[in-house]
Amino acid sequence: MTNGADPTQCGVLELEYGGERSWMGNSHGSEFSGGIRLGITPYLDFHWTAGDFLQIVDVDGDHRGYGDNWLGFSSRYLTQTKNRPSLGLMYMGKLPTGDPDRGLGSGEVDHVLSFLVSKDVQRFHFDFNVSPQWTGVAHNSADRNVALSMAATVPLTKRFTFVLEPYGQTALNPATPAFGSLMTGGSFQVNPRFYLDGGFDTGLSAGASGSRLFFGFTVAVANVYSWVRPSEAVVAKRSFEQKHR
C-alpha cells in the first residue's frame, strides 16, 4: 500500500481494518488484519499494524494463527504548493510475533524506511513511495532491497473514488526475486467519518506472489485532543474528508 506524505490530522485517532484472500501458485491464504493511526502533531503521526489472523493452505497443510506486528511513525517536512509536492518520511519496524514454524512470519526483525511524495494535479491525487528495506536484522545479517509504489486516485462521483496502484521491489536474495504487481480498486464514502475500500491485486511478473482480493474500512474514531482544544474536532473532521477524496 502506498502511503501519502500528509499525516493524520493532529489528535485524530483512525481505525483501519480489512480482510483479503490470496492465491499463490499451489497455495492460498486468508488474512484479517488492521491497526490504528494517531496524529501526534500537525507533522507527525503514529502507525500500528497487526496481522491479527492468518490462514495459509499449502502442500504442508492448513496453518492458522497470529501474524507479525508493525510499529512506526511518519512525518511530513514539506507541504505541497502549486509548483511542488508534499514530502515526508516514514519508518516501520516489524515485531516478529508470527510463528515461523507454521509459516506465519519470519521470526526476525525487519525495518522499512520510506520516502513519501504526494501531489494534487487538478482532479487527480498522486502518492509515490521509495522504500529501502532491511530484513532479518535479528540475526545480524540483513538482506536489503528497495520497494517502489505509486497510487493515483480520482473521484468518479461525489462518494466513489477510483484507485490505480502499480508497485514492486528489487531482488531481496536468490530466493526472492524482483517483481512487479498492479492493484486496482476504489473507496466509497459512507459518511464523513466512515470509508469503505476494496480492490483486486495481480502480479505482472514471474516473481510476483500471485493474485489478491481485498476489502476494508477506515473510520475516524475520535479527536483525542478535543478535550484540550474543542475547536480542533471540527478541523479534524474536515481534514479526514479531504484526505479520502
Image: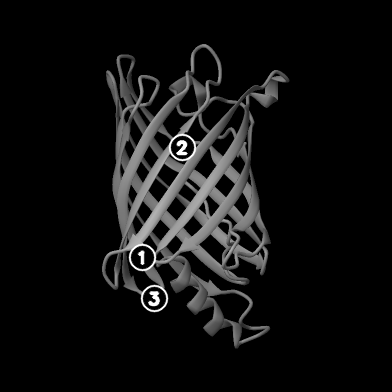
The answer to the question of whether label 3 and label 2 lie on touching residues, with beta carbons closer than 8 A, is: no
SS at circle 3: loop
Q: Which image quarter: residue 5?
A: bottom right
Residue 215 visible in the current orientation: yes
Looking at the picture, tell me which residue is in the foreground, 55 or 223: 223
Task: Determine the CA span between mark 1 and mark 3.
Answer: 8 Å
Q: In the image as oriented, which residue stretches furthest toward the front? A: 83
- Residue 73 lies, with reference to residue 10, above or below; the image says above
Say which amino acid is labelled 2. Tyr
> Disc 2 vs disc 1: Cβ atoms closer than 8 Å?
no
Marks 2 and 1, how far apart at CA:
26 Å
Category of crowding for the residue at label 2, using alpha-carbon neighbours closer than 10 angstroms: few (below 14), some (14–19), many (at least 20): some
Residue at the spot of label 2: 66
Secondary element at image label 1: strand
Q: Amino acid at mark 1?
A: Tyr
Residue 1 seen by the camera: no
Q: Residue at x 44, y 60 (%)?
A: 125
Crowding at dot 1, Cα within 10 Å, few <14 / some 14-19 / many 20+, comes out as: many
Residue type of the residue flagged with mark 3: Pro
Residue 108 against residue 20 in the figure, above or below = above
Which residue is painted at 61% across and 72% down in the image? 11
Kindly give the residue lying farthest to the right in the view shown: 140
Q: Considering depth in this image, is 34 or 42 the residue closer to the camera? A: 42
Q: Which residue is mark 1?
A: 195
Kindly state the secondary structure of the residue where label 2 is placed.
loop
* In-image side of 236 versus 208 (left or right): right
Which residue is labeled 3 in the image? 192
Q: Position of residue 57 (x, y in %)?
A: 30, 24
Extreme residue in the top direction: 174
Q: Is residue 19 left or right of residue 37?
A: left
Identify the residue at image location x=41%, y=73%. Answer: 193
